[in-house]
Amino acid sequence: MKTKYSVFTLCALLFAFTGCRHDEPVLPPEEEQVGTQDTTEIVGFYLLNEGNMGSNKATLDYYDYTSGIYTRNIYAYANPEVPMELGDVGNDLQVYGKRLYAVINASNKVEVMDVLTTKRIGQIDIPNCRYICFKGQYGYITSYAGPISLDASHAQIGYVAKFDTATLQIIDTCHVGYQPDELTIAGNKLYVCNSGGYMVPNYDHTVSVIDLNTFKEIKRIDVEINLHRARVDQYGALWVTSRGDYYDERPRLFCIDTNSNEVVADFDFPVSDMDIVGDSLYACSSGFDYVEMDYVMSYKIMNVRTREVVSEKFISDGTDEQIQLPYGIKVNPRTREILLTDAKDYVTPGYLYCFSPEGVKKWDVRTGDIPAHIAFVRK
């Protein structure tokens, strides 16, 4: 039988002879055959494992659709000369152009890599960085500005940094609310979820609106406390999530009209992560309820056009009983396969599940610690 080798294995074998970290040989990456060959313009995806804060265990995995091979911890082997490897707490992952961007929160940097080889190109230094998005030649990164601390007296107004994707140089900043998290673009406006996560119990509750022409904040939309996720659907509506306060204020999902910049709908269910493909918003939740002292799990699909929940549970084969802590979700826009990560207990390796559009498990695979963020790679 013909043996399959991924590009990461071949590169790693080369580095094993030419590079080392702390005088130790660089070992080949760990591969596992989990799926079957699939050919569309989407050739694979990266998965960023967050790792626990302070453990320096953020890692990067890759799934190759053309071979069905899942490869674990590829960054270390592609970059044996980097002493601290990927860094501490992987908070976001995006592919833009020919580059892969990993936001490494506690390491105060955005790691920039070649999208085909994950070879390090450079980094963008930014304190307490959170999330990233792009338009044209520029990228935009949210920053908590100050150090990681739950002491409200140390909290600072956050900002969005604008950088040139060609030079990786920050060219402007725009102050927003407290502890800004996800951000997204609709038309020529940038929307930023302000969480106020360090201000407990006085959370922020606004979405900042930035004009991309002037890179100035032009409005704040009053939504709900502790905002987190932000997605724009194909009709231009903005969907944002609130984590609530984990006690009396329940987590919720909101829809904002980006023409009027007003909240037009809200939904009384938690969303830990979500993805929008076509008219479908896929949402998973593992929010912790301190009143019930337990996690609230859900797997919903909402129609963004009608704004109605069309499925209360997109997993149809009972696999949800095996999932301990649903954490991240991404849907293949071509095949509509649902990729769902399970963070397990946050301290041991998690799992990635692939479901058919009908909610039947196709395969699963072990990941790194706290698998979270998925970015597709196209031809």
Image (spheres, rainbow, N blue to C red):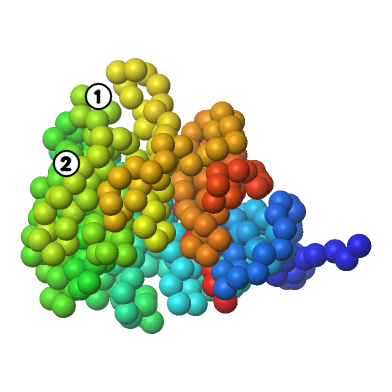
Mark earlier in primary sequence (2, 1): 2
Residue that label 1 marks: 247
Q: Residue at x 41, y 48 (%)?
A: 282
Give the answer, above or below, for where 12 lies relative to 363. Answer: below
Q: Residue at x 54, y 33 (%)?
A: 320
Numbered badge on residue 224: 2
Residue that sits furthest to the top in the current view? 292
Is the N terminus in the top left, top right, bottom left or bottom right quadrant? bottom right
Task: Please indicate, yes or no, whether residue 172 appears anywhere in the rendered image.
Answer: no
Give the answer, above or below, for where 225 lies relative to 276. Answer: above
Residue that sits furthest to the right in the current view? 1
- The residues bearing labels 2 and 1 have C-alpha atoms spaced at a distance of 14 Å
Residue 247 place in picture, x, y as percent = 24, 24
Residue count near mark 1 (Cα–Cα under 10 Å), binned few <14, some 14–19, many ≥20: few
Is the C terminus in the top left, top right, bottom left or bottom right quadrant? bottom right
In-front residue for pair 301/89: 301
Query: Position of 338 compared to 169: left or right?
Result: right
The image quadrant that residue 297 belongs to is: top left
Please name the amino acid that badge 1 sits on.
Answer: Tyr
Numbered badge on residue 271: none
Residue count near mark 2 (Cα–Cα under 10 Å), binned few <14, some 14–19, many ≥20: many
Residue 91 place in picture, x, y as percent = 41, 52
* Secondary structure found at label 2: loop
In-front residue for pair 235/151: 235
Q: Residue at x 77, y 65 (%)?
A: 5
* Secondary structure found at label 1: loop
The image quadrant that residue 44 belongs to is: bottom right
Give the answer, above or below, for where 209 lies relative to 144. Answer: below
Please name the amino acid that badge 2 sits on.
Answer: Glu
In-front residue for pair 166/255: 255
